[in-house]
Image: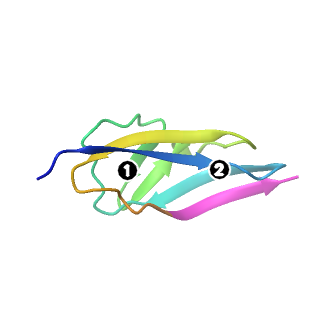
Amino acid sequence: MGTPQSWSVTLENLCNGCVISNVKLTCKGFQSDTKINPDTLYYDGDLCIINNLQPIYPGDRITFLYGRASGQYPFQLTAQREACS
């Protein structure tokens, strides 16, 4: 196995007037060589739960770092809930 590389993931709510919650990413088989704060990301089967499903307000960013010797992981948005005014 190679040397772990560090990767940064940022999810940002760019919607003006919308709150996004219940954000989930696909992460089947994902493993990080570095610890990720579980308030930011935790595993639920093949999904990664972001921000404990809590709201991400306009302009807010959620960022986490992970380390992997096998390279960057292809996260994909699976679910989210939007509440727009």
Circle 1 — which element? Answer: strand
**Are the residues flagged by discs 1 and 2 in contact, CB closer than 8 Å?**
no
Mark 1–mark 2 Cα distance, whole angstroms, equals 17 Å
Image coords of residue 30 (percent x, y): 30, 56
**Residue type marked 2:** Ser
* Disc ID at residue 2: none
Q: Residue at x 35, y 43 (%)?
A: 66
Q: Residue at x 53, y 63 (%)?
A: 77
Q: Nearer the viewer, residue 65 or 52?
A: 65
Circle 2 — which element? Answer: strand
Magenta-tinted stretch: 77-85
**Residue furthest right in the image:** 85
Instruction: Report the number of discs.
Output: 2
Image coords of residue 83 (percent x, y): 78, 54
Splitting the image into 4 quarters, where does residue 73 fall? bottom left
Q: Determine whether, in the image, residue 79 is placed left or right of residue 59.
A: left
**Residue type marked 1:** Tyr
Residue labelled with disc 2? 21
Mark 1 / mark 2, whichever is N-terminal: 2
Q: Nearer the viewer, residue 73 or 78?
A: 73
Q: Nearer the viewer, residue 46 or 11?
A: 11
In the image, is residue 74 part of the stretch drawn in magenta? no
Q: Determine whether, in the image, residue 59 is placed left or right of residue 6.
A: right
**Label 2 crowd (10 A; few <14 / some 14-19 / many >=20):** many
Q: Main secondary structure of the magenta part?
A: strand
**Residue furthest left in the image:** 1
Image coords of residue 45 (percent x, y): 35, 58
Image coords of residue 25 (percent x, y): 48, 59
**Label 1 crowd (10 A; few <14 / some 14-19 / many >=20):** some
Q: Residue at x 56, y 41 (%)?
A: 62
Residue labelled with disc 1? 43
